[in-house]
Amino acid sequence: MSFSEILDRVGSLGPFQLLHVLLLSLPVLFMASHNLLQIFTAATPAHHCVPAPNASSPALPLGPHGAPDRCRRYSPGPGPGNATLPNGTWGHTEPCLDGWVYDRTLFASTIVTEWDLVCDLRQLKEMAQSLYMAGVLIGGIVFGSLSDRFGRKPILTLSYLLLAVSGTCSAFSPNFLTYAIFRFLTGCSLSGITLSTVILCVEWVPTRVRAIQSTFTGYCYTFGQFILPGLAYGVTEWRWLQFIVSTPFYIFFLSSWWVAESVRWLVLTGKSSRALKELRRVAAFNGRKEDGDKLSLEELKLNLHKEISLGKSSYSVMNLFQDPILRRISCCICIIWFATGFAYYSLAMGVEDFGVNIYMLQIIFGGVDVPAKFVSVLCLSYVGRRITQGTCLLLAGTAILANIFVPSDMSIVRTSLAVFGKGCLSSSYNCLFLYTSELYPTVIRQRGMGLGNLCTRVGSMIAPLVKITGEVMPFIPAVIYGVIPILGGTAAFFLPETLNTALPETIEDLQRRKKSNEETEVQNVPLQSCEPEKGTS
């Protein structure tokens, strides 16, 4: 008897599953808020220097593009540089020694206005987001190992508490360094939540509805993107906004005590009596108490140990690159995952660069994910995985590059291209999870998914830092953001198609499938006729 059959006996689709998935999916609504929080808490409003006492002119010096300079002011005496005064005379300039005056029309305060992260310190804003993404990367590695040792549920509960505490501490940080440290810890906790949520959701629902459950949880993240701009519009103080999106996780910390532990993990680690207790609790909740009482410890051990032993393997990440077929798949998958994460967060975190209402644009950015995921599902089913994956990234890269040639005053065109690119990247993510799982054989599939997740986290961590290259030439970041997804889309066309093909169980199955495909291609090549053409002798 497999675990699926045991689950059917205690109720595979009853009140327990509905409440269980709901409790695990609700926190996903606010995970989107933390991922994109710095769009609002680290927004950079218009600013200029506080004029110097007895300056040579009360006006502001002009920058290289004719706009008022944001980083220099007229000095009261001789200085290292000079600038043109409104009356055509010359005056000496100096850095903003007395701070800046900020436009507080949209934001009462942000980390930029609080700690003056402008001019020479403007790189720290991007550094804060990169540190958060670094936390997501490190958290995936650390909490993945901890969950294998201590269980999925304890790590989920710990991660909820860590996110609540670190998010609250970020809101009360006295300086930028403290803020960055707590944001790093917030990123770590987010990975712990993600890993445990996926496992616990999938394990407690039957195979036939896993796609529906996965879609529901995914759309919770999508609709969570609508919550953030609404909160940010009403709460313009960054500290209060940070605090508000963190406090729900105290509630999720308490509700997580009701969530059931992974039965497979309990049996695997020798805690079969606890596993039996969990199954009987589920049976009672689903109104099948008698069926739950009939389950025995010996039956559970015999059946689940056999199933887990078959699925357990000793393969490592290095095995992904030893076989030539796996090497090609792994190299291409790494490029595609990196490109998707890199380009996605370059657009998602660049909302304020398009010169339109930041709140409305964030709602549009979140809304485009709904049709994008729907269209991608249709394309995956009828066009194929490889073409869908490659086309999504090629179109996204083209849209980003096209924005380089659109004048900055054409904000509607620039925004439309950005929204289209964001939708393509959302479709790419939707395709990647399915495509990657189908490319790798069962014995090493989890390692392949882990490698892809690692690459996309690296991409999302590097993306904010690329903006710094704009100080050399303004168009360099857009070129990099556009070229990388095009490379990822090209790499997708070097992968095999998996539409309507059986999942490979072993590496040998993968080799046999490749050989079969090659033989089919040879058979489809038309043979040249050996008969002489008419009129020849």
Image (cartoon, rainbow, N blue to C red):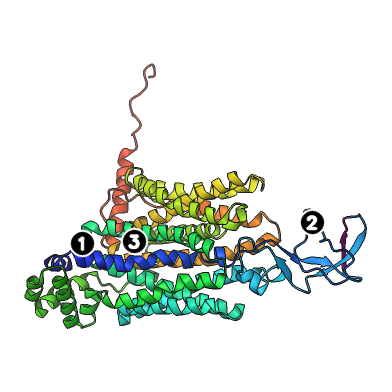
Judged left or right of residue 221, residue 415 is: right
User: Magenta span: helix, strand or loop, mainly?
Assistant: strand
Q: Secondary structure at mark 3?
A: helix
In the rendered image, residue 459, in percent from the top left (x then y), is placed at: 51, 64
In the rendered image, residue 488, in percent from the top left (x then y), is placed at: 49, 54
State the extent of the magenta-drawn residues as a range: 81-86
| Quadrant of the rendered image containing residue 200 | bottom left
Query: Which residue occupies the extreme top position in the image?
Result: 535
The residue carrying pointer 3 sits among few (fewer than 14), some (14 to 19) or many (20 or more) residues within 10 Å by Cα, namely: many
Which residue bears the numbered disc 2? 64
Q: Earlier in the sequence, mark 1 or mark 3?
A: 1
Which residue bears the numbered disc 3? 217
**Along the line of sight, the residue nearer the viewer: 373 or 334:** 373
In the rendered image, residue 300, in percent from the top left (x then y), is placed at: 13, 76
Query: Against 178, is 437 above or below?
Result: above
Query: Against 138, is 477 above or below?
Result: above
Mark 1: which amino acid? Pro
The residue at 51%/49% (across/down) is 419
